[in-house]
Amino acid sequence: MNISIIGTGYVGLVTGVCLAKKGHNVICVDKIQSIVNSINSGIAPIFEKHLEDLLLEVIGDKLKTTTDIRYAVENTEVSIIAVGTPFSEGKIDLEYVKKVAYDIGMILKEKKDYHVVCVKSTVIPTTTDTVVLNILEVVSGKKLGEFGLVMNPEFLREGNAVEDFMNPDRIIIGTMDDKSFDVFSRIYKEYFDAPIVKTNPRTAEMIKYTSNALLATLISFSNEIAAISEETGDIDALEVLEGVHMDKRLSVNLGGKQMKPDIIKYLKPSRGFGGSCFPKDVKSLINFSERLGYTPRMLKSVIEVNNSQTERLINLLKEKIGEINGKTISILGLSFKSGTDDVRESMAINLIKRLVEEGALIKCYDPIAVENAKRELKNLSNIQYFDIYKGALVNADATVIMTDWDVISNIDYDEFRKLTNDPVIIDGCRIFDKKEAQYNDIKYIGIGYRKK
């Protein structure tokens, strides 16, 4: 099929490249010329595993990029809206979705051929069948049926987005009419081995929010157990939750080997969740719910627990080194998770801001996210950045692990002892074995574990 994709962020570019790899003809649209030039040169403007390799395979053949949305829509059968929906002033901001819907509507006004518009951006329930549909109908002068409209949420994990797109576990298509579904589902039929679930747009939108809210809830639940374990002392929440993982309702024993589904990875003590999805989506769902007149108490607690994680790390740090003012703190890991250079809502960034407030000198390291972190923290002083972890460890009074990069988990304990002023480790990702660390004379505290 001929497909246009408006927006070349994580969702848009991954979608475009992967659909082109599957054999579709794709035109990606972005309003920023430098991004268009980069993509057309085979250079991905974002870091995502395998993305640039696939981009080089398809660019100029099955994939092209332009700033001209009219050209893209006029020469395709389906247009996918994949622009950002940031959380602003206490609610989701639909400005970019509305603008693209307006632009597409203006083009559909003159386009004779049937055209399907897809909302792939994460939007609150009722957006597609009210906001987007209304804009398209008013601007184009046409009614649904003369054009198509679907909602097709994405379920991509940053750092694994290409793999997730190419091997989906389900494809959700929310639609109000059969023709829209029949045309749009051709994108996936015969190209992807996954069940296609047909529903209405509001349900499709809610499935996306519910999926992210569930995973965020598991993380905050784990951190609540971790906090109780820390306060009690001599309980390791990591061991507690690993014991819970063995429940046959959570994992399956096949031939004596325990098979653990990916979802239980979220049942682990950690520094908390960040990124462009979980915080924004849970907050957006809370706001949407409250505007309906319902108070989502559990979801509000999910955010409250997550927000408390930075202070818990600060308190653990103070317990080991005393006052933070004037101390040098090494932060290992800046991206919100490994496998990406994304620092949006990163717990590491939140921690650095608080430590600077406390008067600390920060020495931080990340294998790929340093430049993004610099932009996020540009107004703060007393921060040094390193692209080699050893530089961040030199003369540190304590080290805080904030991202579970392999290069960090493979640091030898000797380096902590030799390079730092004091081999204090606050492990926010639980990537080190506490007994092994202590055996190697490391002063270790892991989230969810504190010896009393």
Image: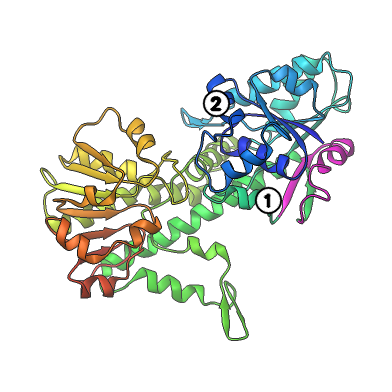
> Of 374 and 89, which appears nearest the observer?
374
At mark 1, the secondary structure is: helix
Mark 1–mark 2 CB contact (< 8 Å) = no
Rendered image quadrant of residue 84: top right
Lower sequence index among marks 1 and 2: 2
- Extent of the magenta region: 170-193
> Of 271 and 309, which appears nearest the observer?
271
Marks 1 and 2, how far apart at CA = 24 Å
Q: How many marks?
A: 2
x and y percentages locating residue 210 in the rendered image: 60, 49
Residue in the picture at 54% in, 77% down: 247
Within the magenta stretch, is there residue 41?
no
> Of 313 and 217, which appears nearest the observer?
313
Q: Name the residue under label 1.
A: 166
Residue 330 in view, yes or no: yes
Q: Quadrant of the C terminus?
A: bottom left
Rendered image quadrant of residue 437: bottom left
- Which numbered marker is on residue 229? none
Relative side of 302 to 30, left or right:
left
Where 66 falls versus 382 (above or below)? above
Residue 122 in view, yes or no: no
Where 110 falls versus 54 (above or below)? above
Relative side of 314 to 408, left or right:
left
Where 74 falls versus 259 (above or below)? above
At mark 2, the secondary structure is: helix
x and y percentages locating residue 116 in the rendered image: 81, 30
Q: Mark 2 points at which residue?
A: 35
* Amino acid type, callout 1: Met
x and y percentages locating residue 273 in the rendered image: 43, 50
Relative side of 136 to 300, left or right:
right
* Amino acid type, callout 2: Ile
Rendered image quadrant of residue 257: bottom right
